[in-house]
Amino acid sequence: MLQVHYLYLLCYDVNGSKLELKEDFQIFDAANMPVDPIVDRDIFSRNDDMIYYMNTYVENPLIFKKGDKFTARAQIKQIQGDGILYTALIKRTLNHFPETVDKLDLTKAIIISKVEHKDLGPASKVNTYKLVNGVISGDDILIGAEKDGLGSQISGGRQWQSGQYNLVILYKNTTFNMSTFKSIPFTISY
């Protein structure tokens, strides 16, 4: 493993504004990667009817209305050790586009599910699936619900309204400090 201490990037726009980024990162030899987290399965349903399955849109665009049940199922594979998985709804007008769990702002996200795992063996999986009456399901939220999957009041900037949203899947392996994410656009007609 080659470890790089930080990347430093400095950009100026035509107006003279400056953006400065400093990021720590690691480079692994692909043959020796301890984990390679991948969003393996992502399935979304509206009122128990599947409308999206792993980059396949049964409906396009995806539209939800007030009172619809949004069920999100997500699975991450090629992991081990400890980690955390979130599924969240985020209004695009909030300009919050997290690509890691560490950058997820809970004041701007409506959490559907949070799953943590500990001490998984090599080549394991984690998911938000549940078995309900012999049928695989996932965590769900009613569009217009008062509380999210963490029990937090949905208010302020997160308050439900018509517009463009993203369903965001965020995973971080805390043992090896490796992450993955996926974002799927949809619309709420409130």
Image: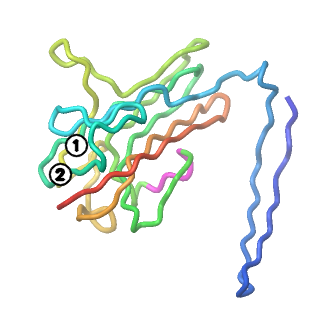
Label 1 environment density (alpha carbons within 10 Å; few <14, some 14–19, many ≥20): many
Magenta stretch: includes residue 92: no
Which residue is tagged 1? Answer: 141
Mark count: 2
Residue 85 disc label: none
Where is the N terminus found, in terms of image quarters? top right
Circles 2 and 1: CB distance less than 8 Å?
yes
**Among the 4 quarters of the image, the one containing residue 174:** top right
Instruction: Determine the residue located farthest toward the bottom in the rendered image.
Output: 15
Q: Which residue lies at the image location 23% right of the left edge and 64% below the top edge?
A: 162
Left or right placement of residue 117 versus residue 27 in this view: left
Does residue 112 sit above or below 80 in this rendering? below
- Tell me the kind of residue under disc 1: Ile
User: Is residue 72 among the parts visible in the rendering?
Assistant: no
Residue 91 visible in image = yes
Magenta span of residues: 101-105
Magenta highlight: main SS: helix
Judge whether residue 102 is colored magenta: yes
Front residue (pair 180, 49)? 49
Where is residue 66, by image quadrant?
bottom left
Q: Amino acid at mark 2?
A: Ala
Where is residue 18, by image quadrant?
bottom right
Front-most of residues 59 and 3: 59
Label 2, on which residue? 145
Return the residue nearer the eye: 154 or 53: 53
Q: Who's the residue at 28% across and 48% down the image?
A: 62
Pick the quarter of the image with the C terminus: bottom left
Real-space Cα separation, disc 2 to disc 1, in angstroms: 7 Å
Residue found at x 18% / y 33%: 49
Position of residue 10 measured from the top left corner of the image (x, y, whole percent): 80, 69
Say which element carries label 2.
loop
Q: Is residue 129 left or right of residue 68?
A: right
